[in-house]
Amino acid sequence: MKRISFATSLVLAASAAVANPNVSPLVSPAELDQLRQAPHVRVIDIRPPADYTKNHIPGAASAPYVAWRGPAHNPGQLPQLTQLAKLVQSLGLDENIHAVVVSTGENTTDFGAAARVYWTLKYLGLQKLSVLNGGMQSWAAAGLPQGQEVPAISPSRYEPVVNEKILATRSDVITQIDNPKARLVDARPAAFFEGRTKAPTAAVPGTIRNAVNIEHSTWFKPGTNEVVSAEEAKKIAAERFPELADDTIAFCNTGHWAATDWFALSELAGIPNVRMYPESLADWTNTAEALPMDNTPSRGTQLLEKLKNVIN
């Protein structure tokens, strides 16, 4: 593996931050309360419509998470570019607008939704992006204003400039799977990584060959639903990856938990060349020919687990 010091990666991250010196990828409720009143800031509420209708941050626009996802059999798949472009335009977003993504904040898994939308917006070429740390729960806990008024938003004419650098396809993963200078990161809980359970969208349990496991929950303050600071993320990343890879690809079951790993490694820790495989194992395990896997139980074990589930 190519030896690049973590200090070097921090220099690169600092250089990248110069382009948007006033935009932090993670904002607190107090910070958002100050930001939201500026005309160039758009709060994007990705909760279900019923939750948005009940109460939301004043001025926030509704764009439910499901609108950013793929079909039921492969929810990690990106929607058509034309569909995403219309969604972004309807929110009035363009390269001059600072978009802040807000989810429910009810648990650590929920953060993956905000991170996934952030990743999608960055994939579409937008750069001024943030996520509200702790989501609406942290906003409500801080006693900050909420309302029910739906803002009038003038659509933009933004045309996506696709950022392929943060996207990994199945072919990319196949190419890098045995590359000692690349790293595949499985963001799922250990039971999934070790093949002791699987998601309904995956054909078989286990993980992609040669992957390492960094659970998405690693990036949260103990006992809370709040993501750690950039400084703490850098420490965690340095402990896990004392040597950096030329290419890091995060994945999970459907590109949800993986978005948290991608966000923490790329946006907070500042590691260069971090991508996400959005379709993840829903795609990898459902190909015509089986692709390389680790931690896959024997056929007999899998049948026994299916029998247990039927009995229970």
Image (cartoon, rainbow, N blue to C red):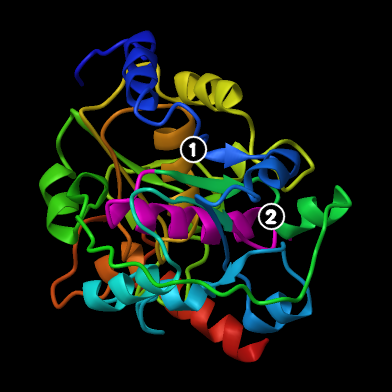
Q: Residue at x 69, y 55 (%)?
A: 135
Callout 1 crowding tier (Cα within 10 Å): few <14, some 14–19, many ≥20: many
Say if the magenta span includes residue 104.
yes
Which type of secondary structure does the marked residue at label 1 adopt? helix
Q: Give the magenta range.
A: 102-127
State the residue at coordinates (26%, 75%).
286
Q: Which residue is more in the foreground, 135 or 291?
A: 135
In the displayed structure, would residue 142 be above or below residue 103?
Answer: above
Q: Is residue 24 magenta?
A: no
Is 291 drawn above or below residue 4 in the view shown? below
Amino acid carrying label 1: it is: Ala
- Judge left or right: residue 34 versus residue 198: right
Q: Which residue is mark 1?
A: 264
Asked if residue 256 shows in the view, the reply is: yes
Query: In the rendered image of this protein, does residue 32 appear above or below residue 7?
Result: below
The quarter of the picture where the N terminus appears is top left
Position of residue 52 measured from the top left corner of the image (x, y, whole percent): 69, 75
Q: Earlier in the sequence, mark 2 or mark 1?
A: 2
**Image coordinates for residue 251, horizontal then vertical, percent:** 36, 53
Residue at the image point whose x is 33% and y is 19% from the top: 15
In whole angstroms, how far apart are the C-alphas of marks 2 and 1?
16 Å
Mark 2 sits on what residue? Answer: 135
